[in-house]
Image: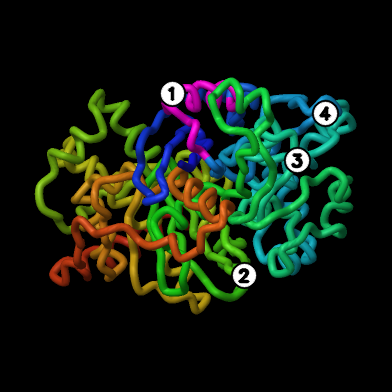
């Protein structure tokens, strides 16, 4: 048996997988996010450990487990003191307090040259500069900086370890060399000594501490794999590991993820170029900050369940004049704009609940189209696209995506092919399995582009792009 732990923003999910990759048990424990100031987003790292403890206890008999893999939300800045405890709440990926610090770092060309990426406000390095300026006592007491899943690893194993895919989102990794950059660390007042050691995602990183193994009924010596950042682990889970393969994730955030067999950075596009969770591979991502998050926000204001709103829609329709910009907390790809905010435009008397629901789905679709254009402009090819995440349950949404991208979208059969499952696959690899186990799932349905609506979606996307440029200086 093998376990995958996926530390998300809203919950920690655990899956128990056998050696045929069949999920035998799963458990999810909810997590809460604190927003003590506008643009801030924090979590208590101890709640991650408590959630993992509950999840492991809910999986049943663990006596046959041989390895555990970790997946987790990226970019979080967890400041750890000399006692291996967090000094303050972790500053999460969707926290934009360090936008000024990020802009200052990004103005130095060395950051993009070494990391292959823009220094985004949500990345880890600018948050440490913010901490040095605004919380100097906590910064001075920091023994090491850990990403969220790696704080969980420290609790599990006693080892401070990170892996390449997650480390690439800190702004301190030389992404091509797959190693920490001493030069960039020094620019933020840190050294290699503040960083965890690095392993590949499919390699062992440590052993579960005996007291935890005894508590959960694990055998002695259970390996903990390097694992992956949430999107890289999800790619392992849905078999996106070769060039030409991609997935679109409609989760809290939206991600268009394309595997690559070479390092091809293009930071000027606001595309993320990171290491993959397998050795010698990389990937590119376009990221939007609100996908189902935008739909859930609208559903809350409408007093309805999101599934009820989307389920009431019929066949795909051409976009109306109404536009929705899903920038509820800023945007990454392609704008790198922490200040832009969301908007409805062109509302009229015909803008009923169904029309506004379609506008929200279309707005996120347009944002994913922005990511698609940015990725393909770098030379990345996307030949196969798999849809995952809660939003992938909406037929209307996937039909809109296929038509906007002019690319068939595959929805897998019912099952979990996300970060927790990918982490379990990485656990199997750390126990000796070949990377060939990362195969794509069986397809349940293929959503083909509607050629009759192609021009209508292209026109709506052009208006969407123009709306951003018209509004960006007003927010």
Distance from Cα at disc 1 to Cα at disc 3? 26 Å
- Report whether 84 appears left or right of 251: right
Q: Are marks 3 and 4 in contact (CB under 8 Å)?
A: no
Q: Earlier in the sequence, mark 2 or mark 1?
A: 1
- Residue 327 visible in the shown view: no
* Picture residue at 66% right of the left edge, 59% below the top: 118
- Report whether 351 appears left or right of 29: left
Residue 280: give its label.
Answer: 2
* Picture residue at 61% right of the left edge, 62% below the top: 275
Q: Are marks 3 and 2 in contact (CB under 8 Å)?
A: no
User: Eyeballing the image, is 83 above or below 225?
Assistant: above
Which of the 4 image quadrants contains residue 16? Answer: top left
- Residue 376 visible in the shown view: yes
Q: Residue at label 4?
A: 81
Instruction: Classify mark 2: residues with Cα within 10 Å, few (<14), some (14-19) or many (20+).
Output: some
Element under disc 3: loop
Q: Earlier in the sequence, mark 1 or mark 3?
A: 1
Element under disc 1: loop
Element under disc 4: loop
The location of residue 392, given as percent across then percent down, is 29, 48
Distance from Cα at disc 3 to Cα at disc 2? 23 Å
Magenta range: 48-65
The location of residue 442, given as percent across then percent down, is 26, 59
Distance from Cα at disc 2 to Cα at disc 4? 33 Å
Which of the 4 image quadrants contains residue 279? Answer: bottom right
- Of marks 3 and 4, the one in the foreground: 3
Instruction: Classify mark 1: residues with Cα within 10 Å, few (<14), some (14-19) or many (20+).
Output: some
Q: Residue at label 3?
A: 160
Distance from Cα at disc 4 to Cα at disc 1? 31 Å
Q: Earlier in the sequence, mark 3 or mark 2?
A: 3
* Picture residue at 43% right of the left edge, 76% below the top: 381
Q: Residue at label 1?
A: 58
């Amino acid at each position: 048996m093998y376990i995958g732990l996926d530390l998300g923003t809203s919950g920690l999910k655990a899956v128990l997988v056998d050696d045929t990759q069949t999920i035998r048990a799963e458990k999810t424990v909810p997590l809460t996010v604190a927003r003590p100031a506008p643009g801030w987003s924090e979590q208590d790292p101890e709640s991650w450990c408590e959630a993992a403890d509950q999840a492991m206890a809910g999986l049943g008999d663990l006596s046959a487990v041989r390895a555990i893999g970790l997946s987790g939300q990226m970019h979080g800045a967890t400041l750890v003191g000399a006692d291996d405890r967090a000094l303050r709440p972790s500053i999460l990926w969707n926290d934009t307090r360090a936008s000024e610090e990020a802009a200052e770092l990004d103005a130095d060309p060395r950051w993009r040259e070494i990391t292959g990426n823009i220094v985004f406000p949500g990345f880890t390095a600018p948050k440490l500069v913010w901490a040095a300026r605004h919380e100097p006592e906590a910064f001075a007491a920091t023994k090491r900086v850990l990403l969220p899943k790696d704080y969980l690893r420290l609790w599990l194993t006693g080892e401070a370890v990170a892996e390449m895919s997650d480390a690439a989102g800190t702004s301190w990794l030389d992404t091509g060399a797959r190693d920490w950059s001493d030069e960039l660390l020094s620019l933020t007042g840190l050294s290699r000594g503040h960083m965890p050691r690095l392993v590949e995602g499919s390699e062992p990183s440590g052993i579960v501490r005996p007291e935890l193994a005894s508590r959960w009924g694990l055998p002695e010596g259970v390996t903990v794999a390097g694992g992956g950042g949430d999107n890289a682990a999800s790619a392992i889970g849905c078999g996106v590991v070769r060039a030409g393969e991609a997935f679109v994730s409609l989760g809290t955030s939206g991600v268009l993820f394309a595997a690559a067999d070479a390092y091809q950075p293009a930071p000027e596009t606001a595309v993320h170029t990171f290491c993959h969770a397998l050795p010698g591979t990389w990937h590119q991502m376009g990221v939007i900050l609100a996908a189902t998050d935008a739909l859930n926000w609208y559903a809350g204001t409408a007093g309805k369940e999101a599934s009820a709103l989307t389920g009431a829609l019929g066949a795909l329709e051409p976009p109306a004049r109404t536009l929705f910009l899903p920038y509820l907390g800023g945007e990454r790809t392609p704008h790198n704009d922490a200040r832009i905010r969301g908007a409805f435009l062109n509302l009229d008397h015909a803008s009923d609940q169904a029309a506004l629901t379609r506008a929200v789905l279309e707005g996120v679709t347009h944002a994913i189209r922005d990511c698609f254009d940015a990725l393909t402009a770098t030379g990345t090819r996307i030949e196969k696209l798999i849809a995952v995440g809660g939003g992938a349950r909406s037929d209307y949404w996937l039909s809109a995506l296929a038509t906007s991208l002019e690319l068939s979208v595959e929805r897998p059969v019912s099952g979990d092919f996300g970060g927790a499952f990918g982490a379990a696959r990485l656990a199997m690899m750390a126990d000796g399995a070949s990377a060939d186990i990362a195969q794509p799932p069986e397809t349940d349905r293929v959503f083909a582009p509607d050629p009759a609506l192609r021009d209508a979606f292209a026109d709506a996307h052009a208006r969407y792009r123009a709306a951003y440029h018209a509004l960006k200086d007003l927010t």
